[in-house]
Image (cartoon, helix red, strand yellow):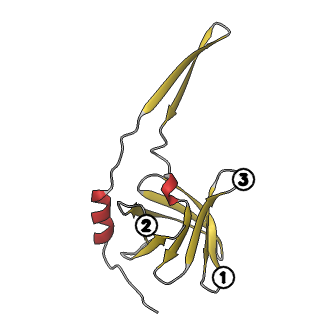
Amino acid sequence: MRKFLLTTGALVASLMSIAAVQPKEETIVTTECCNTPIDVTGSNLVDEIGMEIFGIWQTLDNEFVQITRDMDYKITFMRVAKTKALLAKGFISGDQSTLSIERTYPVEETYSSQYVFSPSKKTLVIMKPNSNEAWVLHKVQ
């Protein structure tokens, strides 16, 4: 088994410098209903995790991570071994640079990690909590 270990945040830092970060844009819609103006304000979801995170990712250790939305529209993840054994599952929230991860299996824990995509969006690097190491994932689907 090949193991790759990132001992510094250099890869994450270089990918973050390449990644384009869009400024938050507000959209205001005004409509008339029953002679009363209604203002609805929305954003372009810059403060949320982008769609590119969804799918099936393969780690360098040949494990797989599936990231989807559940029926309540929460972002969920499941990490399985190559033997198809469930290794971890939980919920993800966050913004364009930080993931808040709530593991519910095999132990309950919550942590935040910085993350970044490669310019092609096919490689995802997530910093391990309380560490200078990172998980490197490649999108397979």
Figure quadrant of the C terminus:
bottom right
Residue pointed to by mark 1: 84
Query: Total of numbered circles in the picture?
Result: 3
Work out whether mark 3 precedes mark 2 in sequence or the reverse, and give the earlier one. Answer: 3
**Amino acid at dot 2:** Leu
| Mark 2: few/some/many CA within 10 Å (<14, 14-19, 20+) | many
Q: Nearer the viewer, residue 87 or 138?
A: 138
The local secondary structure at tag 2 comes to strand
Residue pointed to by mark 3: 71
Does 30 appear above or below 41? Answer: above
Instruction: Kindly check if marks 1 and 2 are in contact, taking CB atoms under 8 A apart as contact.
Output: no
Residue pointed to by mark 2: 124
| Mark 3: few/some/many CA within 10 Å (<14, 14-19, 20+) | few
Q: Residue at x 36, y 75 (%)?
A: 132
Disc 1 from disc 3: Cα separation: 24 Å
Disc 3 from disc 2: Cα separation: 25 Å
**Amino acid at dot 3:** Met
Q: Nearer the viewer, residue 93 or 14?
A: 14
Disc 1 from disc 2: Cα separation: 22 Å
Does 96 appear above or below 82? Answer: above
Q: Residue furthest bottom?
A: 1
Q: Residue at x 33, y 67 (%)?
A: 12
24 left or right, relative to 74 = left
Residue 14: quadrant of the picture: bottom left
Which label is found at residue 9? Answer: none
Q: Residue at x 60, y 84 (%)?
A: 82
